Image: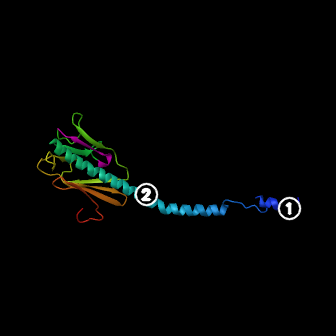
């Protein structure tokens, strides 16, 4: 090959094998990148899981709070007793809940009674512990005036709370003696929650 041809090939973008540059990662560079990515994931995953648990807790708390308010407003609107009880066997609030017009005062939705709303089962991370004045049967009942009532006496109010927990976080849905519900954080409001 003539010397003139070689210089013209070099100018046109042709490089000889010894001059070509390899692109990509070496095995050592790839291992360092994977190591760094692994460390970042180990740091990030626990905080991501805590964020997901907190979101589940807030979602469950809001759903329960809204269900209590719906139970109360339906009792006022209809002018009759309306109950909210745990779904399924009636013992665990984590199974969900049912709101209905309890015509026979047995705290169980029967076929002939009007169903207003039902909520499905909560995620297994969420735990609910109820604490009410009348705790023989799990229920909250409102009369037509919007006040809570117990099974023993329509004039005795049913007050108390549900403690919802997911991981280290907790929330409470509190019902006062007038039947009004509110949400609080026991960690931030220890004296009033």
> 89 or 2: which is nearer to us?
2
Which percent across, then down, holds residue 51? 40, 58
In the rendered image, the quadrant that contains the N terminus is bottom right
Q: Let me know if residue 97 is in the magenta part.
A: yes
Instruction: Tell me the residue that label 1 is attached to.
Output: 4
Which percent across, then down, holds residue 167? 37, 58
Taking the spot 59% from the left edge, 60% from the top edge, the residue there is: 34
Q: Let me know if residue 181 is in the magenta part.
A: no
How far apart marks 1 and 2 lie (CA) works out to 67 Å
Which percent across, then down, holds residue 33? 60, 62
Is residue 138 visible from the viewing direction of this image? no
Total tally of numbered discs in the picture? 2
> 12 or 186: which is nearer to us?
12
Instruction: Tell me the residue that label 2 is attached to.
Output: 49
Taking the spot 30% from the left edge, 55% from the top edge, the residue there is: 164
Query: Relative to 40, does residue 123 appear above or below in the rendering?
Result: above
Mark nearer the N terminus (1 vs 2): 1
Q: Which residues are magenta?
A: 92-103
Q: Residues within 10 Å of mark 2 (few under 14, many from 20)?
A: few
Q: Name the disc covering residue 52, or none.
A: none
Which percent across, then down, holds residue 103? 17, 38
């Amino acid at each position: 090959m003539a010397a003139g041809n070689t210089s013209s090939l070099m100018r046109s973008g042709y490089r000889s094998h010894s001059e070509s540059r390899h692109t990509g990662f070496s095995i050592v560079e790839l291992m360092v990148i994977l190591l760094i990515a692994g460390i970042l994931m180990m740091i990030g995953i626990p905080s991501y899981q805590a964020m997901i648990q907190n979101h589940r807790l807030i979602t469950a708390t809001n759903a329960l709070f809204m269900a209590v308010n719906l139970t109360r407003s339906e009792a006022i609107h209809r002018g009759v007793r309306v109950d909210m009880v745990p779904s399924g066997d009636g013992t665990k609030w984590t199974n969900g809940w049912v709101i209905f017009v309890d015509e026979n005062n047995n705290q169980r939705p029967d076929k002939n009674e009007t169903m207003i709303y039902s909520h499905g089962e909560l995620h297994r991370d969420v735990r609910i512990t109820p604490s009410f004045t009348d705790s023989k049967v799990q229920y909250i009942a409102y009369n037509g005036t919007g006040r809570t009532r117990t099974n023993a006496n329509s004039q005795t109010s049913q007050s108390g709370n549900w403690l919802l927990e997911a991981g280290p976080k907790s929330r409470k849905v509190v019902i006062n003696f007038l039947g009004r519900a509110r949400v609080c954080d026991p960690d931030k409001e220890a004296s009033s929650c």
